[in-house]
Image (tube, grey):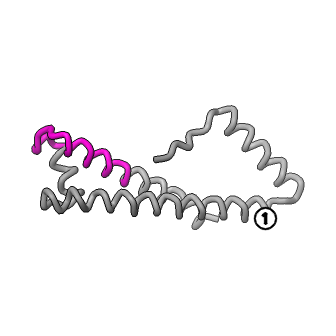
Amino acid sequence: MENFEMSKNSTGAAHQKIDALIALGAGEIVANTLNKLISYRLEKYRGCIAQIEAELKKFEKNYKMASDVFYREFEAGNLGDAGDYFEWSSLYENILLYRERIEKMEALITNH
C-alpha cells in the first residue's frame, strides 16, 4: 500500500515552513490547505480500505468466517498456520492501520 513516514529533517523543515507562513499572516490559508490535504488523505485511505475489504470478502466466503472473528482466533493461535491465514491476517492488519489513520486525521479536522 503506502508508506508516508517522514524523516525528522523533513518534518522539521515542514514545521518551519508552516510557522513562517503563519507568521506572515497566512494562517487561514495554511489551515485550509492542511484541511484539504487531510481530506484528500482520508479519501485515499477509505479507498484502500474498500479495496482490501473486497479481498477480505473472498476469504470470509471461502472460510465462512468474518474477518474480525478470524483475526482474533488466528492471533490467539487457534487456527493453525495455513498460508491463506497469513495473507488474510496481513490484509486485516492493513484495515486496522488505515482505520487508525482515519481516526487520527478525522480528529485533526474536528479539533480545528
Q: Indicate yes or no whether the magenta region holds residue 20.
A: no
**Nearest the camera: 33 or 15?**
33
* Mark 1 residue crowding within 10 angstroms, few (<14) / some (14–19) / many (20+): few
Q: Determine the residue located farthest toward the right in the rendered image.
A: 24
Q: Quadrant of the C terminus?
A: bottom right
Q: Quadrant of residue 60?
A: bottom left
Q: Indicate yes or no whether the magenta region holds residue 84.
A: yes
Kind of residue at disc 1 = Glu
Question: 112 above or below 2?
Answer: below
**Nearest the camera: 56 or 101?**
56
What main secondary structure does the magenta stretch of the protein show? helix
Relative to 111, 33 lies left or right: right
Q: Secondary structure at mark 1?
A: helix
| Residue at (71, 37) in percent of width and height | 12
Q: Quadrant of residue 87?
A: top left
Relative to 37, 73 lies left or right: left
Residue 23 drawn at (x, y percent): 86, 52
| Residue at (78, 64) in percent of width and height | 28
Residue 20 drawn at (x, y percent): 84, 47
Q: Which residues are magenta?
A: 75-95
Count of numbered circles on the image: 1
Relative to 85, 109 lies left or right: right
Residue 93 drawn at (x, y percent): 33, 48
Q: What residue is shown with label 1? A: 28
| Residue at (68, 59) in percent of width and height | 34
Relative to 41, 95 lies left or right: left
Q: Quadrant of residue 86?
A: top left
| Residue at (22, 50) in percent of width and height | 71
